[in-house]
Image (cartoon, grey):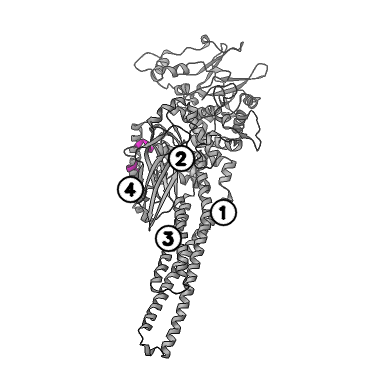
Amino acid sequence: MSQWNQVQQLETRFLEQIDQIYDDKFPMEVRHLLAQWIENQDWESAYNNEPMAAILLQNLFIKLDEHFDRVSQEKNLLLIHNLKRIRKLLQGKYQSNPMHMAVVVSNCLREERRVLAAADMPLQGPLEKSLQNSLVSERQRNTEHKVSAIKNSAQMTDQDVKYLEDLQEEFDFRYKTMQSVEQNDKNNVVVKQEMLMLQEMLNTIDFRRKEVLTKMAQVIKETEDLMNTMLMEELMDWKRRQQIACIGGPLHSGLDQLQNCFTLLAESLFQIRRQLEKLDEFLVKLTYEGDSIPLQTPHLLERVNFLLYSLFQSSLVVEKQPCMPTHPQRPLVLKTLIQFTVKLRLLIKLPEMNYQIRVKAAVDRNASTISSRRFVLCGTHVKAMAMDESANGSLSVEFRHLQPKEMKSCAGSKGNEGPQMVTEELHCINFETQVCLYGLTIDLEASSLPVVMISNVSQLPNAWASIIWYNLSTNEPQNLAFFNNPPSVPLSQLLEVLSWQFSSYIGRGLNADQLSMLVEKLTGQQVIYSDCKLSWSKFCKEHLPGKQFTFWVWLEAILELIKRHILPLWIDGCIMGFVSKEKERVLLKDKTPGTFLLRFSESNLGGITFTWVYKSESGEDIFHSVEPYNKGRLTALPFADILRDYKVIVADNVPENPLKYLYPDIPKDKAFGKHYSSQPNEVSRTTEGVKGYVPSVFIPVSKILSDSTDPPSPSDLLPMSPSVYAVLREHLSPTVMETALSSPYSTD
């Protein structure tokens, strides 16, 4: 079943996350129409290969044109219109930068896999449960209900003001008519009755004025109460969900609902403001002693203006946090002189503000950072907010070409700071603008979540660890001194976030057994207690016992290994991965000879090994593990092919493959068959230009000495044919060659 078909069978709550993935950068209509074709392309390779990306973009347009021709014949007017619009949109965005489209599509597919993996996980962690709290959902519904009620009340007072205006116009006309009556006619009975009628009308006007002002005061109070409690709580919850999504958690939603609430409240307050100004106009024609309008409107107008200021100042949010397009799963880590994107939205959507608000971006403006390094932003750092920046028509602005540059006056100081120190320095991207509307001038500011500035890509893993720790530990928006004294975090929450690293980065999270091995790695204990916490130093600074690397460096190397070399096997669940040598022997004990499992090396960074069990002549279980395969050797030969073709020679016996069943009892070819790059014994590449020779293949072989436990010496290794060696030397670097040709047998 295709990935898109699996997506369409998800539950509603997961479909909502899928909906968050697709926007005007890559419309869902294209994903649906070209589902199978999209899944068959190598988008990840294309975003580092411009010619390949250009070909993919051109092929995508061809596919869309084919669909357009088909629907044109069917005369489907709506689909014809949408396809025209989508093609024009994609052409405008990516024709000059096809690699960016490859990044976007690759990211969409990866996010789909993450949601699918989350749907397969039977249990939610504590963080995810807190984000999906039913009480929070109830509060959101109550907020929307109250906002609608306030809007209705403001519209009702609008009708009251119009009625009052009509009543006053009638009074003014009748009063002026009475004024024109001759003095000697004023004692007339009819005139006296008219005077009584005017007095009664005046009493009614006074009552109506007081009534409408009371209603306005009530609307203002309800708005104030809602803004200070439920609405701000909703906004803070959204920002917290965004933090968690940045470190791999569930995709956050709810911003459209917040925009609707902010916009309706702003419209209601402006409506009340116009009504108060209208009441002031009434005083020109009619006022009297004890008139409530001059007594109450100045105070009410002041409250309305204050609420509008507060509402606008809370409405500018960073919709998409700073992120380098080349590392979409590593937001908030920025490399100097490399472009990043960031998107802002004004939650108050009023048509008269379209293209009227210019936003300026800067680094560390009005922020207290402990770093001695200072940065400026290169590129277009001032842009206008517009409704056509987003598919949903929100008032937003996206900065796509910003680059952080370290100021020369500070560049000399970085030589005294080690990579670890640099990756614990926090900075922020600040934004400022001004709204001028209906006589109000309001200064607005917003800031990104803290970012880490790196100057070398080798600093990225530790920088990302800092981003994880910050956003897991705190919801403070700008605590740039956080790493002066970083707090410990609950281990249960950290494990959940570690699983997210796998689900968001490579499409499949970790199960309970895999997480228990990480617990043992972090704490030395197999069981975690409810109040167990882990320090920042233990996570990212202290070396693992007996090793020359930290826990995080070890885990990050595994993530890269999976992503670059064994992703399909990981997605299919073929790799147990996180299991200790002691545990694997317990699992394999008493299993059918030839049963094996795949696990990540604990001593070699970015290494994967397999261990199998067989019976000795005495019936005793014997275990063997190969020397871990790392990225160099997996570049030479796909891991699935290694498992298929692997051979062992015991003493002088004929080489045979000891791998029969993937744990617990899955036939090897059934588990890995679809991942083989060629049929068994098929020559992957024949020797070119040399005739008369028998073609050869590259087969991994280990030699096990039956009478010794010593590792094999170089003289025990089988020779490689010259033709295979020539092919490998042609395509691989000397370093990779040396790694690939080393003995694959070890006791790791």
Instruction: Kindly report which numbered mark, 3 or 1, lies closer to the viewer in this rendering.
Output: 3
Q: Amino acid at mark 4?
A: Lys
Indicate whether residue 703 is drawn in magenta: no
Task: Mark 1: give few (<14), some (14-19) or many (20+) Cα within 10 Å.
Answer: few
Instruction: Kindly report which numbered mark, 1 or 2, lies closer to the viewer in this rendering.
Output: 2
Q: Earlier in the sequence, mark 1 or mark 2?
A: 1
Tell me where residue 693 appears, x and y as whole percent.
Answer: 39, 13
Task: Mark 2: give few (<14), some (14-19) or many (20+) Cα within 10 Å.
Answer: some
Q: Is residue 493 left or right of residue 359?
A: right
Q: CA distance from mark 4 to mark 1?
A: 41 Å
Tell me where residue 252 appears, x and y as whole percent.
Answer: 50, 45
Q: Earlier in the sequence, mark 2 or mark 3?
A: 3
For label 1, the residue is 138
Q: Find residue 602 and report its image quarter.
A: top right
For label 3, the residue is 270
User: Which of these two is toward me, 704 or 432?
Assistant: 432
Q: CA distance from mark 2 to mark 3?
A: 33 Å
Point out which mark residue 367 bears.
2
Q: What SS does tag 3 mark? A: helix
User: Which of these two is toward me, 482 or 392?
Assistant: 482
Q: Earlier in the sequence, mark 4 or mark 2?
A: 4
Which residue is drawn at the image coordinates 56% and 17% (left, top)?
Answer: 746
Q: Which residues are magenta?
A: 90-101
Q: What SS does tag 2 mark? A: loop
Which residue is drawn at the image coordinates 39% and 30% (left, top)?
Answer: 409
Q: CA distance from mark 3 to mark 4?
A: 39 Å
Determine contact: label 3, label 4, CB under 8 Å. no
Instruction: Kindly report which numbered mark, 4 or 1, lies closer to the viewer in this rendering.
Output: 1
Q: Amino acid at mark 2?
A: Ala
Q: Amino acid at mark 1?
A: Glu
Determine contact: label 1, label 2, CB under 8 Å. no
